Image (spheres, helix red, strand yellow):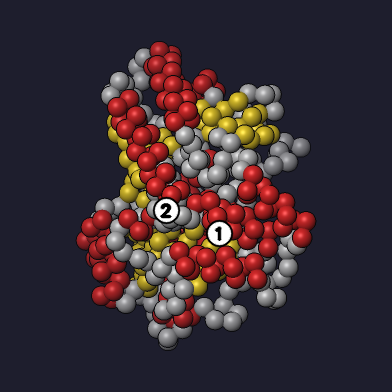
Amino acid sequence: MSITPLMPVYPRCGVRPVRGEHCHLISEDGTRYLDFASGIAVNLLGHSNEHLIGAIQRQAATLMHVSNLYGSPQGEAVAQRLVDLTFADTVFFTNSGAEAVECAIKTARAYHQHAGNTERFELITFNNAFHGRTMATISASDQDKMHKGFLPLLPGFKYAPFDDLAAAEALIGPHTAGFLVEPIQGEGGVRDGSVEFIAGLRALADEHDLMLVFDEVQCGVARTGTFYAYEQYGVVPDILATAKGIGGGFPLGACLASEKAARGMVFGTHGSTYGGNPLAMAAASAVLDVVANEAFLANVRATAARLRARLEQFIGNYPDLFELVRGKGLMLGVKLRIEPRAFVAHLRDNHQLLTVAAGDQTLRVLPPLVIDDTHIDEFMDKLSAGAASFLAKDPEQ
């Protein structure tokens, strides 16, 4: 038997974590790693937050799962908190970011088709986006590497260059239902859309009665220094997909929508066996207890400013390796002058520093939101040593 028991779809590295302590991971051989990847922006409270662990333990001992055929006091409570904290009037809970985006796509189409406009089904999306790995979400993502082997794609998506408002406007036609956009692209290279671009999409959506759908799966839940990134653009979406950090490590996503946008999501139009189960709601409630307040968000912004200043000062020491720093809050990207995966592997294997590669030659820096200056010092020490040893190993880089 040649295939591995775990389907070989991931190029898994040699790091094998078995335990987490705050902002560090410990592998089965005892090696300790500074985790500035956070499970790709998931473990926003680190790996051993007592409040989150306690909430999950208490709920697991009480009630883990019931069908959504019954009332959900746990789900109602978390949904109300999200409604109170955001633009949304209603929430559908999912198990993942891809499912949240799927629900957002359905909600945008249903807005028009519930009213009899069955011809309006297309969403305009943007180059280098990443919306998930389901058939609909890879179809919404204009990346050949995600499409290969899975053709034909699902119809109903058109692609425009990111941050190009005129190109997006040019694609609007009789079949357009809305825009689907990451305000800050994650996998695409931590590229934040300009205020003019995001506000322009809002204006076009209003002018043409389109749905503005934000994918904040990676940039949401305090990651950028506000509860959701849209708050920094002076506009609100009609629909928003969220996941990753909202469960603090427990699998959870959600689709948030205004009452107007959700007019087509009526009985029987959508569902999920596990979505919003009591255990997931306990995790989400614990995360919100910690992050959904101005003191925590202000600390994220202040910590992020210190980390970014250190990074921007540092990269000038290695102009042949680093180009610039971008992003918002603790969703930072360091654009390299080389393809990033070799450098990410070098930091991991030689300096016990975990980061994440992304598109556009970008090194993603996604630490837990609870880091302090000691973690920033450790990160900069490891990054500095890693840059020096990487270039010494291969001076032509």
Give the crowd class for mark 1: few <14, some 14-19, many >=20 residues within 10 Å.
Answer: many
Q: Which residue is mark 1?
A: 253
Q: Is residue 320 visible?
A: no
- Label 2 Cα neighbours within 10 Å, binned few <14 / some 14-19 / many ≥20: few
In the image, residue 155 lies at what x, y percent?
A: 44, 67
> Of all residues shown, which one is farthest toward the bottom?
116
As shown in the figure, which amino acid type bears the numbered disc 2?
Glu
Q: Nearer the viewer, residue 228 or 216?
A: 228
How much space separates mark 1 and mark 2, taking CA atoms? Answer: 23 Å
Q: In the displayed structure, would residue 320 be above or below residue 16?
A: above
Q: Which is closer to the viewer, label 1 or label 2?
A: 2
Answer yes or no: is residue 382 visible.
yes
Q: Is residue 139 left or right of residue 352?
A: left
> Front-most of 349 and 134?
349
Q: Quadrant of the N terminus?
A: top right
Task: Tell me which corner region of the image, top left, top right, bottom left or bottom right, holds residue 123.
Answer: bottom left
- Dot 2 falls on a residue whose secondary structure is helix
In the rendered image, the quadrant that contains the C terminus is top left
Residue at the image point whose x is 30% and y is 58% from the top = 233
Percent across and percent down for residue 187 are 43, 45
* Identity of the residue drawn at 63% across and 49% down: 52
For the residue marked with disc 1, what is the amino acid? Answer: Gly
Kindly identify which residue carries mark 2: 294
Q: Is residue 17 left or right of residue 190?
A: right
Q: Secondary structure at mark 1?
A: strand
Q: x and y percent of residue 74 in the render?
A: 64, 67
Earlier-in-chain disc, 1 versus 2 = 1
Q: Are marks 1 and 2 in contact (CB under 8 Å)?
A: no
Which label is found at residue 318? Answer: none
Q: Residue at position x 63%, y 23% from top?
A: 31
Q: Is residue 353 above or below residue 49?
A: above
Across the whole image, how many numbered discs are drawn on residues?
2
